[in-house]
Amino acid sequence: MVSLQTVRKSNAHIAALPQGLVAVFIGATSGIGQSALQHFSRHASSPHIYSVARATSDASHEKLLATVRQSNPTGTYNLITADVSLVSEIDKVVKAITQTESKVDIVFMSAGFMAFEGRQNTSEGLDPSMTTRYYSRMRAVQQLLPLLNKAESPRIVSVLAGGMEGPLNESDLDLRDLPNWSFWNSSVHSATMGTLVLERFARQNPRLSIVHWFPGPVDTPGLARARRFGMSPPTQRSQEEAGERAVFLATNDRFAVQGGLVPMQEGLEAARRSGGGIYLVDPLGESTDNEGLLSGLRKRGVDEAVWGFTESVFADCAARAGAGSSKDEL
Ligand SMILES: NC(=O)c1ccc[n+]([C@@H]2O[C@H](COP(=O)([O-])OP(=O)(O)OC[C@H]3O[C@@H](n4cnc5c(N)ncnc54)[C@H](OP(=O)(O)O)[C@@H]3O)[C@@H](O)[C@H]2O)c1
C-alpha cells in the first residue's frame, strides 16, 4: 500500500518538473477526474490543461476551471465542449488539441457511468455506458498517439477496473443482443476490452506508460447515483484522496516504462506490469494481477479480435459522422 503521505510528497515534486506539461482530461467535470485535475493543476508549472465537458456540464466546468486558474495562474486551461458518449466527438477533441499542441504528456480518462436504467443506444447505435468507458477512451488514445509519442515520458491513466477483468461474450462484444446485455456485463466488457486494447497500444508504443486503475469505492456523484439504484459499496475513500492518488499514478515514475516524471522516493519500487505490458493498479497504488484470465485471452488472440471489432465500430461511427456532415452541407 502506498501511504497518502508518500502520494502527497510525490505530488509536491510535480512543481520541479519541466514547465508546460500538456494534460488532457476526459471525465473531469465530476468525481475522481475533477479532483485529479484540481490537484494536478495546483502543482504543475505552467501546465497546458485540456478538459472535455458535454454541453450540460459546460457552465459548471467553466466555473471550476476559473477557480483552478486562480489557484495557478501560470497554467492555460482549455475547455473543449464535446459529448464523449459519441465516438465521433473524440475526433473533434483531438483536432482541437492538435491545432495548438505539438505533444501530449498525460491523458487522464475517467468518463463513464453504469447504465442502471437499461441500454439506451446513442445515435451511433452504441450503449453510452460502454462508449464512455471503452470506445471513446480507446479512440482518444488511438488518435492522440502521434502527440503522445512526441512527449519525453508519455503516460495514460484510465480509471475503471484494472485487475477486475472478466470473461467476454466473444460472439457479441458489443452485447447488441438484448439477452446478452446487462449493466454488469457492459461494465465487465468495458474493463476487459479496455485492458486488452491498452496492452496492445503499449506493445506497439514502447515508450508509452499505461495505467489501468481500479479506484475502489470513492465517494463521488457517480457513486451516489449507484446508491440510488440499490448498490451499497463498503467503506469509501473521499473524492479528494482519490484525486491525489490519481495524480500520483499519472506522474510518479513507479508507473513509467522509462523515467522522466517524478522520481521514485526511497522505499518505493517500480510497479509490476501485466503480461501484456500495462500497469494494472489497485485502489492503494499497488500492482495487481489478472493473468489467470488475461494470458488465456491473449494466447487465443482475443486481444486482436477485440481490436479488429473496435476498429470496425470506429469506421462505422466515422462514416455516420461523415454522412451527417455532408447532409448538413447540402
Ligand atoms: N466512484 C467509484 O466508486 C468508482 C469505482 C470504480 C470505478 N469507477 C469508475 O471510474 C470512473 C470515474 O468515476 P466517478 O465516480 O468519478 O464518476 P462521476 O463522478 O460520475 O464522473 C463521471 C464522468 O463521466 C461523465 N459522464 C457520465 N455519464 C456520461 C454520459 N452519459 N455521457 C457523457 N459523459 C458522461 C461525467 O460527465 P457529467 O459531469 O457531464 O455528467 C463525468 O465527467 C467511471 O468510469 C466509474 O465507472 C468509479
Image (cartoon, helix red, strand yellow):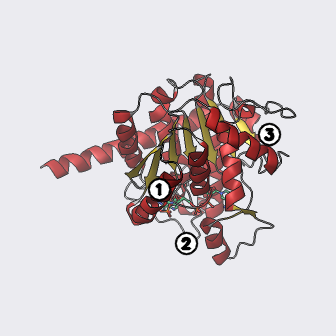
Q: Look at 35% across and 38% down and name the residue there.
A: 95
Mark sitting earlier along the chain (1/3): 1
The residue depicted at 71 percent of the width and 29 percent of the height is 299
Residue 167 picture location, percent across and down = 71, 48
Q: Say which amino acid is labelled 1.
A: Leu
Q: Amino acid at mark 3?
A: Ser
Picture quadrant of ligand 1: bottom right
- Report the Cα–Cα distance between label 1 and label 2: 31 Å
Give residue 65's mark: 1
Q: Residue at x 54, y 40 (%)?
A: 107
- Which residue occupies 44% across, 64% down? 57
Determine if residue 161 is in view: no
Q: Does any portion of residue 227 appear in the rendered image?
A: yes
Per the image, the residue denoted by label 3 is 287
Is residue 86 or residue 315 the one in the foreground? 86
Q: CA distance from mark 1 to mark 3?
A: 32 Å
Q: What separation in Å lies between label 3 and label 2 (alpha carbons)?
A: 33 Å
Closer to the camera: disc 1 or disc 2? Answer: 1
245 vs 97, left or right, is right
Residue hosting label 2: 117
